[in-house]
Image (spheres, helix red, strand yellow):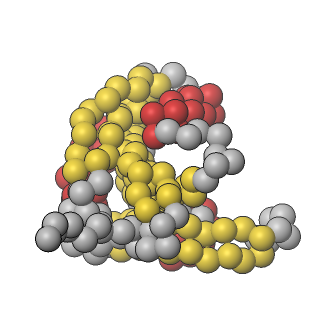
Amino acid sequence: MLFVPPMVMADIHKEAQVCEESGQICFLWWPKLPEIRGWHQDVESSYRYRFNAQVPDQYTFANAEAVMYANAEYQDASTEAQTLEAFIATSQQQFIDAVPYKVDVSKTGEFTSKGKQTFFSYAFLPEGEGNWEQVSYAEDYDHDGNKYYIIFVLSARSKEGYEKNIDAYNEFISQYQ
């Protein structure tokens, strides 16, 4: 008899509601995250921005020096980027095109989470003024077999904020399952 270990599935928050700005149905899909000491979910910002917004205790998404957020992008046959590599390339280009400053993007490593997902991490460092960002990408399936691109982001207003919070960011990724 062949033993096949159970596959760990992503725990995705899934909700649909009417969005105030458009009056259309909006889907709120984000990965549920482990509790990390010193951080909490900013629920109001999570609903406003449609991702799992995490902030240092005693702060909000609006006033924190650094924030983290995680998103789950549903993937099916109609998804433009059919591979994680294509999704990463598209995501990075959209970010570069959207910011009003020059940014240097470099791969910082690959990390395996508690749930055995491989995250590919990239630093987005401004040349001068701008946000310091760390973005990590992975693929995962939920309990219903739906496939998602999982994106984790650390966004800091300064190099110091980035460096101070990178360990907590890495802990979110390592504990994700």
Q: Position of residue 111 (x, y in %)?
A: 23, 46
Q: Name, please, the residue furthest toward the front.
A: 1
Q: Quadrant of residue 9?
A: bottom left
Q: Position of residue 160 (x, y in %)?
A: 27, 42
Q: Position of residue 137 (x, y in %)?
A: 40, 45
Q: Nearer the viewer, residue 127 or 33?
A: 33
Q: Position of residue 108 (x, y in %)?
A: 27, 33
Q: Nearer the viewer, residue 174 or 103?
A: 174
Residue that appears at 50% across and 56% down = 148
Q: Is residue 95 visible?
A: no
Residue that appears at 56% across and 29% down = 93
Picture mark count:
0
Q: Is residue 43 visible?
A: yes
Q: What is the quadrant of the C terminus in the image?
A: bottom left
Residue that appears at 35% across and 34% down = 123
Residue that appears at 68% across and 76% down = 16
Q: What is the quadrant of the N terminus in the image?
A: bottom left
In the displayed structure, 104 sits above or below 115; it is: above
Left or right, 166 with respect to 70, comes to left
Q: Quadrant of residue 8?
A: bottom left
Q: Name, please, the residue furthest toward the right.
A: 23
Left or right, 36 with respect to 41, comes to left
Left or right, 107 with respect to 20, comes to left
In the displayed structure, 96 sits above or below 140; it is: above
Q: Quadrant of residue 90?
A: top right
